[in-house]
Structure formats: C-alpha cells, structure tokens
Amino acid sequence: MTNTKKIKKILIANRGEIAIRVIRGCADAGIVSVGIFSECDRIALHARMADEVYYVGDSPSKESYLNQDKIIEIAKRANADAIHPGYGFLAENATFAKRCEDEGITFIGPKSETIALLGDKLQARNLAIEANLPVVPGAEFDNDNLDKVSEIAEKIGYPILVKAAAGGGGKGMRVVNDPKDLNESVESAIREAGAAFGDGRVFMEKYLVRPRHIEIQIFADRYGNAIHLGERECSVQRRHQKVIEESPSPVMTPELREKMGMAAVNIVKASDYIGAGTVEFLVDRDLNFYFLEVNTRLQVEHPVTEMVTGVDLVREQFRVAEGHKLSLTQEDYSPRGHAIECRIYAEDAHNNFMPSTGTIGEYREPRGPGVRVDSGVVAGSIIPIYYDPIISKMVVWGATRTEAIERTIRALREYRISGLHTTIGFAYAVMNNKKFRDGDYSTDFIDREYPERDFEYAGVDQEKKAAIAATVFEYINRQKVSMTFKKGPEKKSGWVTYHRSEGVKKLHR
C-alpha cells in the first residue's frame, strides 16, 4: 500500500507561460492554484488566471521570484500544500527545496540532496562515470592556481570547452581554439560563473565539433521505478540556449534510443531521483553519445514529449509528489507522429537575438489541427526588461516529420505579434532551410547557416501592416482604462480586487 497524501492547493513560484501551464494542470486535477506576481506583473496573464494571487515583491527577480523568504511566507499564508517551481528561478535551487521540506511544504521536484548532487556538474559527471555512462574527455583543476591549466588542456586536446561547475544557460562557458587564449578564457569564465551563480568553479572538457544536442525525458517515483519517454532534438541554439526542438530526432535509431534511454534511467536511479527530469547528451557524427548534464526540473520544451506520447507531464508530477507510483511503465512508452516546438521570443533575430522589450499590440495565435500554443501574454501585455523574454511556445504535431514541418510553416504564417521584434520570422526561415528539412544540422546550425543573421520571412509585409495597426491601437488604448481597480482601505486590508465576468478575485499585497 502506497503512502499518499492528496495535494489540494499548489503555489506556483514562477510567471509567464510556465505558470499558466501549471495553473491549467491544477484546474484539470481539481487543485487550487496560487499565483505570485511582481510589481511589473500586476496585470500579467498568469496573475489573472490563478485562483488566488499574491504580490511577491518589486520587479527585479531577486526581490520577487527569487525571494525565498517571501515565497515561503506566502505559501504558508495561503495554506498551500505544495510549491511547483516551474523552470528557471528557483526550480533547481537545492536550498529552496530544503526550506520547503523543513516547512512541511511539498516541493514538486526531486529531493534537495538530489538537486544539490546533480546541479553540480562535476559531481554529476563523476556520478555518470560511476553509472557507466560515456562522458566527454575532460578534467578538473585548481581554479586558484592556473599554473598547470595549459598542461591539462594539451592532454585533453584542442578545442577546449571551459564550463562552470554550477548553473547553466551558457554562463561561465568558453570555447578555446588557441592555446594562447586559454588562461584569459579560464579567468573570464571563473568571473562570469562567480557573478551568475555565486560559485566560480570551472572545469575543462574536450569541445566536440558540430555535435547534436539530444536529451532524454525521464520520470521516477519514490519506489525506485524510473522510465524514459524518448528523446528531444535540441540542436538549434543561440548562445548555448535552445530555440527550436523536435521529437523524434532525425538521426535517432531504435537501438540508439534504447541505449540512451537506459543510460538516462541508470543515472537517475543512481541519484535516488523523484519526479520529472531530463538527461542531456551530446551526439557526434558517428552516433556516439556522451553525458552532458541532468536538469532536475520540467523542461521548457516538455510539450514536445507530451504531443508525441500523450502523457500529461505536469499531471504526472502532481501524482508522484502525492506519493503515487508512476502511472505508466517503460512498456507503455509508445510515441506517435512527430512534434516540433518553436520558442517565440521577444528578440530581434537580425540583431543577434537581442531582447526586444515593450508592449504587445496585436496578438493572434495560430489555430487548427495539430497546433498548440503555450503562451503567457495577450494583446496589451508588457514584456519587461527583468526576465527571460519568452512570449510563448508554439508546438505542432504531424503524422510525419514532413507534415509537422509544413504545419509549422502554416502556423507561423498565422501567428501575429506586433509592437516589438519576435523570433517568428527566424523560425519560419529555419523551417524552410534545406539543412534543417534534411535533418542535417548540429549545435552550430545558426552560425553556419545564418552568419549575418539574414533570415527571410514571407510574412514580413503582413508584419509591417500589423505594426502600423498596432501603433494606432496602442494610441487609442491609452485613452481608455483597460482594467478597473478597486483599492480597499490601505491600513485595514491592503488588498486590490479586479473584476472579471465570473466574479471578483483578490490580489493580495
């Protein structure tokens, strides 16, 4: 008999599209959702959709979505049974997970010890070696004494990749092709890692030329059951961050999937893992694969797996957190068709993907067969400077890869966002790129195919027209009050309400 405890209320310690994804998961499961919002997110869509919403702090992340004290305080005040961290922010913070455990609040994710173990890339690498996973040749070194760093690099062989031991997202990462640049690159990586993660440790690995980045979705429960749900190809990247993903990978074979899947299961079992996670690998041209890292959370691109497997990963997270066994076995894994995800960012792809902040004018999502959009915005939403500029994730399913690509092109042509730059045109160009359509691409795809960032988009005329219309729309909209706020007595209640068709909801300060 399993020891289970029903979760009745979940605080979502995040914002934007992932917060909305979890809010919807709560609604599907009959669970009350508790949202939090920062100063600049007062009228954000996630703050309007949650059942209860609390003000968490000023706009900068460290004062709001990274404010552990305030989030724990709100969870206790709201009587939340659990906290779902989403991705980013505190999702892989072992200290925050431990604080939840100490407060008797269920952290929807792995145990704090597991997060700490796998979040340290050096420890994760050593664990992978113990679990017989292939790893890229590399070495640790004394970051306070760089006298032997050249000798170590020569043994590994150039090009070298310097990596931060903590964190990710390309921070503290440097590719070194020339020995004369090594020391400067290492010192720079140490400084950047220290600033980004509070941990300046770095190490070296052999830099694989033109590898593919393929990750395996895993799930485990507290009873020792662990499965994989296949792979996602994530090789279209800018600044070491993914922008387009697909499943299955164009180069995957049943034999390679079995090997990589079992390798992923082996390392999560070795780490006493619980919940959803992703094991990432690099794959070379000869289809040799090498362990890269473990992401101890739900991935941005999880809808790709949901589309081809039919498994609701967020709902499964809830079940496992309640103490249930996994609802499926490895034999139940039976993917169907092909899925492609385009991350739609508020970025200027022509200007090396620089963030584009501002107010969205026109906003119209694509519809039709096989199209899913997980978004965090509506017309009039603000893309602030404080957070990752992701607007949405457009995910498309087709019976075949070719059908999925053609359907993605159709959906991108339907997508309308005005008032700022987006990556819609970039995604459209990729879908029409011969190398991508042939499945012949690697992690340097953008730099090799678009060194001048000259992405052509057939929808550019429509975008110009939409931009003009959005300017008029914004001017007219400024003359109106888009939302009526009713402020209660400041000293007594300190709350704000807003009205919507189904009733009134409190926005707690």
Image (spheres, grey):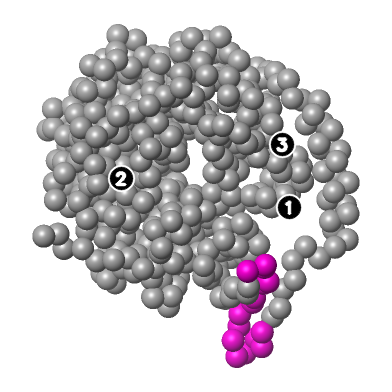
Magenta-highlighted residues: 488-502
In the image, what residue type sits under mark 3?
Answer: Arg
- As drawn, is 357 to the left or to the right of 219? right
In the image, what residue type sits under mark 2? Ala
Which residue corresponds to mark 3?
416
x, y percent for residue 295: 33, 41
Residue at image location 33% in from the left, 17% down from the top: 252
| Residue 276 visible in this rendered orientation of the protein | yes
Crowding near the residue tagged with mark 2, few <14, some 14–19, many ≥20 C-alpha atoms within 10 Å: many
186 in the magenta segment:
no
Q: Is residue 300 above or below residue 427?
A: below
How far apart are the two marked residues, 1 and 3, measured between alpha carbons? 13 Å
Q: Is 85 placed above or below 465 here? A: below
Residue at 22% from the left image edge and 47% from the top image edge = 326
Expressed as whole percent of the image width and height from the top left, the position of residue 218 reads 28, 38
Q: How many marks?
A: 3
Residue 380 — which label?
1
- The answer to whether any part of residue 343 appears in the image is no
Neighbours of disc 1 within 10 Å: few (<14), some (14-19), many (20+): many
Q: Between residues 316 and 167, which one lies in front from this camera angle?
A: 316
Residue occupying image coordinates x 22% and y 58%: 323
Main secondary structure of the magenta stretch: loop
Comes first in the chain, label 3 or label 2? 2
In the picture shown, does residue 144 fall above or below 5? above
Residue topped by disc 2:
276
Is residue 217 toward the left or the right of residue 386 in the image?
A: left
